[in-house]
Amino acid sequence: MDALRLAVDALRKSEARYRSLIQGAAYGIYRTTVEGRILDANPALATMLGYTVDELLSMEMATLYQSPDERAALVERYQHAHHQTLTADVTWQKKDGTPIIVHLSARVVDFEDGVSCFEGVAEDITEKRALEAQLRQAQKMEAVGRLARGVAHDFNNVLAAIIGCSDLIALRLKPTDLWFEETQEIRKAAERGAALTRQLLTFSRKQMLDAQLVDLNVLVAQCHSMMQRLAGDRVPVRTITAETPTVVRIEPGQLEQVLMNLVVNARDAMPNGGTIDVRVERVTFGERTVLRYPDLTDGTFARIAVTDTGVGIPIDMQPHVFEPFFTTKDPAKGTGLGLSIVYGIAKEAGGTVSFSTAPNAGTTFEVLLPLLENRGQALEAGCSEPGAGG
């Protein structure tokens, strides 16, 4: 009897240690029937999904998936790999509907009574995936920026020769000569090319800027008439400013270019008319900022949001939005540099650009810049005449 009692005590202690290990684990751990009913779940899984453990034990596993078909495909895989531990990255959804990317490690377990179940470990890798995607995007944009910078400098040398030769030819001609007008057209074309190289240098963030303190409320209000002329009569532009000064450090002309490019982009997304809202506001971000806004830390920022009511951006085009020369417009209507220039200007000013869009429900582009508090008198710069959009 003493031996039996010792064995029972040892088993009880072993089970308690096992239960403590599962309950205190950092990763979500669960057990389900093959059909999908949740038999057991630890607190980490409940916290990950926003439920209580009791709530999870009354649920079906398929309800955790954003697409139930994804679980059905996994079950099919596991049935063909019996007694093996398989891994997969899947998309679950939290109690509030927020999607999360989860790395699963699971296996099929057979009990003595012939019943089988799934045992799995779940890790939320949403933030990890976001960081990886942002790193890839940053590396790609840096590579494209270096290429654009090299092309711009070499092209400038070619254009300088073209402009110089056209000027020398013009000096030998009279204004009434047949070829005088052609030489002027050559010079104008070269100057347009030079303007294009300046845009490339802006994108590559290697252009010297005269940064100043600017109150976004003042500048956006002053640029309202300019933005309305760019948008046209069929697209009213509404400007909404913050209740308190929203001061950033940026070159005013570059900020005007940001507004012009975003308004032109919004206008072109609404071929049948619509509205454009340009909003200035202060925003404060917490520790999960990185999931939405690359390269930003916690804190308070100034935000310019330009919202249209247009067709939205197709999902297959969204990864390329800020790449230079990428455009959905007719080649005669845009160079594809507008949004890449906005990206370059925002990055140069220590901020970033993001967007949200939906089919036929419009698009919002957000320019986020470091907010300055009590940093002297902000420049009340006027807005220049509209230039060419991208």
Image (spheres, helix red, strand yellow):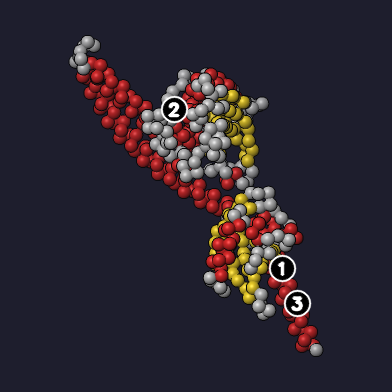
Q: Position of residue 293 (x, y in %)?
A: 56, 42
- Name the residue that disc number 2 marks: 389
Residue for badge 3: 12
Q: Earlier in the sequence, mark 1 or mark 3?
A: 3
Could you tell me the amino acid type at mark 1?
Answer: Ser
| Position of residue 252 measured from the top left corner of the image (x, y, whole percent) | 50, 25
Q: Nearer the viewer, residue 107 or 260?
A: 107
Tell which of 281 and 30 is nearer to you: 30
Mark 2 vs mark 1: in front? 2
The quadrant in which the C terminus is found is: top left
CA gap, disc 3 and disc 2: 74 Å
Q: Is residue 37 visible?
A: yes
Q: Which element type, helix, strand or loop, lies under badge 2?
A: loop
Residue, x 51% and y 28% (percent of image)?
Answer: 272
The local crowd at label 2, few if under 14, some if 14 to 19, many if 20 or more residues have their Cα within 10 Å, is many
Quick one: label 2 or label 1, which is nearer the N terminus? 1
Numbered circle sitting on residue 20: 1
Residue at 37% of width from left, 29% of height from top?
A: 332
The residue at the far right in this view is: 1
Q: Alpha carbon of mark 1 to alpha carbon of mark 3: how far?
A: 12 Å
Dot placed on the residue nearer the N-terminal end, 3 or 2: 3
Name which residue type carries label 3. Arg
Work out how far the residue at label 2 is from the one at label 1, CA to CA, in angstroms: 62 Å
Residue 238's place in the image compared with 73, above or below, is above
